[in-house]
Amino acid sequence: MQKKKITIIKVGGKIVEEKESLAGLLDRFAAIEGAKVLIHGGGRSATKIAESLDIESRMVNGRRITDEPMLQVVTMVYGGLVNKNIVAGLQARGVNALGLTGADANIIRAHKRPVGEVDFGFVGDVDYADGDMLGRLIEQGIVPIVAPLTHDGKGNLLNTNADTMAAETAKGLARLYDVTLTYCFEFPGVMRNPDEPGSLIPTIDKESYKQLLADGIVSGGMIPKIDNAFNAIDNGVSQVIITKADAIDGISGTHIVA
């Protein structure tokens, strides 16, 4: 039996934190036909509110150190302010959205990242996403809006990378659906040169990815994004697209293929 299609959109904090870009994103997300899920960030808002509370933001390689005061901030911002603004905006557009963290209905379970060279504090590494539970919600006509927070089953919330949560959610749903996962950010896709609009790389497979890494064309935060994309592809996700937030129709962007 042919699986139903589902679209999972992961969107960075910058896009959902600014009124104009959020409105445009919600218009485009509402227009996507069929089953869908949105997973969002919100890091800049967390940094701004932490600063207003005299809580220091510490980052290592783009990852936020999350001690107890910072965990309180990201819980308020990700699970509250940012998430509920998205939910309210989608309800206004006729989308029956439901805001969730990984703790809600136990949809995403994680464990606290072990202390290595850096103690990241209350940061989670995902163990699994419950595709069956998400599927039950989706089949009721609900559109999950997932904040980048998980839990460990022991009462602890964990700040968790949204790209990873998107890949794990896609993997969890792949048994039930024909999944397209789209990562959207401020560029049209993976670029050979971010300053040249015509330098988009339309397709990346594992061999070309090795070369792009060796040549330094793919670097920094794009590496974990593409690693997550291949992890999803290797675990049953039909396609992964990296594209601009105003192009989430699944046509343009960089397609990550097996």
Image (tube, rainbow, N blue to C red):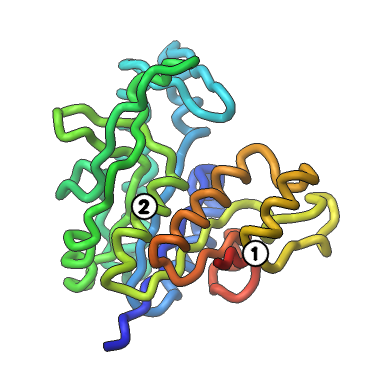
The numbered disc on residue 168 is: 2
Asked whether the beta carbons under mark 1 and mark 2 sit within 8 Å of each other, the answer is: no
| 131 left or right, relative to 14 | left
The numbered disc on residue 254 is: 1
Look at label 1 and name its amino acid.
Thr
* Residue at the spot 57% in from the left edge and 67% down from the top edge: 257
| 172 left or right, relative to 217 | left
Please say whether residue 80 is visible from this viewpoint: no
For residue 191, what is the image quadrant? bottom right
The image shows residue 194 at horizontal and vertical percentages of 78, 50
Q: Is residue 48 above or below residue 130?
A: above
How many residues crowd around disc 2 within 10 Å: few (fewer than 14), some, or many (20 or more)? many
Between 140 and 51, the one lying in front of the other is: 140
Q: CA distance from mark 1 to mark 2?
A: 20 Å
Classify mark 2: helix, strand or loop. helix
For residue 115, what is the image quadrant? top left
The numbered disc on residue 237 is: none
The image shows residue 20 at horizontal and vertical percentages of 56, 53
